[in-house]
Every structure is written in structure tokens, then in C-alpha cells.
Amino acid sequence: MAAQATFAPTAAAKRQAIESIAAVNAERCNIPQVLDALEITVGTVPSINLYIFELLQNALDAGASRVSFVFDMGSSSVIFEHDGPGGFGDEIAHVKGLSNVFQSTKSIGSVGFMGFGFKTIYKRFQTVTVSDVAGWRFKFHVGERQLQLGPQVNVYSRAWLGAVCPTWDDSIVAPSQSYTTRFAMSLPASTFSSTPLMRDLDEAFFQDGSCTVMASG
């Protein structure tokens, strides 16, 4: 199967790899043990802005020297880009690392060494799209469904299988000039939809001057 290959040098091969990863994970991960683990792990993430540090860590792991955060208040979205050499390249392992749980390319001691680090994004957002200069274009969607438990009591059920089943999408925007990798987060989770996105940045202490930060809307 394509997902078992080491390289995906063409766009068709990359798309096939994404579809194969999704098919395998839809079967392997659609069990209570995995879905409950995702729900519990994301639910117990101590801060909704932890995704900022996870994205920065991923950029450092990729050898990036420059990153950019764009907080768009109008669309309630955040775009993160970095200039790590080659983006994801043709290696499937890095792409699978974003899709899997209990597996990761990170070392023990890092936030995401069990494959959960990237999933911190879903504490804050329902959707994340991923693109790079090597031609990868895919997204994850962890949708939610509102459950009414009483006249004024609502809870939200999340579709956690979406966190491990990527979808190929040719319409996803490529990284900006001078960057190699792009993550776009959108649709804030309802639990935190009233919290301004800029508060995520204010509460995260990245003020070392190495980041370009812009806000629009």
C-alpha cells in the first residue's frame, strides 16, 4: 500500500499516500480505546494556546530559522508558516506522524513523542490544513455535534476519528514566498469560541524577535 512506502515523489503518489493513511487509520483507530485516548488527552491539555508551542517545536525540528503567525480575527483563523528546508519533502513518515497516535518521529520527553502533540490544535480548532513546497496538500477536520442535556445545558461531541484521517485537497493554499510549510487552523471549537484568538498569543510568551506576527480583521 502507498502508505507503507518510504517516498511519494509525485503529486499522485502523495495523494495516494494520504488516502491510504486515512483508510488504514479509519479501520485501526475507530475503536473506543483510541477515540477515548484522543478525547481525554486533548481534553486535559492545560491551555488552549499550547498549539502555538507545538507548532514552534515542529518548526525547530524541521530546521526552520524563520516563522510567521497570522491571526485573522475576521475569519477566526490562524496561519502558521516556517522555512524548514524542503517542507515535508517526499518522505511519508513525517506526514504519518501528524496522522497517528501512539507513534511519532519525536523523542521521548517531547510533548508529541506519543503522536499527541499535533493533536493539541484540536483543543482550540476543528480544522487544520497543511501544505508545503514539496506538493503536500491535506487537511484534518474534527467536527463537533451539539448535544442538549437540558434547557440551558449544552455539550459538544467531537468526531475524533478526523484527527487521524487526513483528506487530500488540491484547493489548499501553498506556503507564502520564502516559507516552505503552512498550517492553517480554522473553526474554533465552540467551548472556546468566545475567547479572542489574540489572547492565545498574549498568553504565550514568544517575544524573542524571531517570529513575524501579524493580525488582521
Image (cartoon, helix red, strand yellow):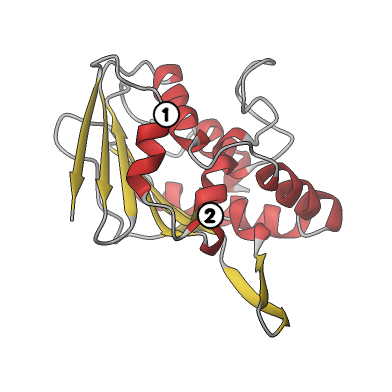
The earlier-in-sequence mark between 1 and 2 is 2
SS type, badge 2: loop
Identify residue for label 2.
166
Identified by mark 1, the residue type is Ala
In the rendered view, tell whether residue 206 sits above or below residue 130: above
List x then y, in percent, for residue 18. 52, 51
**Residue under the image location 77 percent in, 59 percent down:** 30
Of the pair 205 and 34, the residue shown nearer to us: 205
Check contact, mark 1 vs mark 2: CB within 8 A.
Answer: no
Residue 175 occupies which quadrant of the picture? top left
List x then y, in percent, for residue 46. 63, 36
For label 1, the crowd category at 10 Å Cα-Cα, with few meaning under 14, some 14 to 19 and many 20 or more, is: some
List x then y, in percent, for residue 82. 30, 29
Q: Which mark is residue 169?
A: none
Residue situated furthest left in the rendering? 177
Residue situated furthest front in the rendering? 152
Identify residue for label 1.
204
Could you tell whether 108 is left or right of 192 in the image? right
**Residue under the image location 53 percent in, 54 percent down:** 166
List x then y, in percent, for residue 205. 39, 23
SS type, badge 1: loop
Identified by mark 2, the residue type is Pro
**Residue under the image location 55 percent in, 38 percent down:** 118
In the rendered view, tell whether residue 156 sits above or below residue 194: below
In the rendered view, tell whether residue 217 sits above or below residue 190: above
Is any part of residue 179 visible from this angle?
A: yes
For label 2, the crowd category at 10 Å Cα-Cα, with few meaning under 14, some 14 to 19 and many 20 or more, is: many
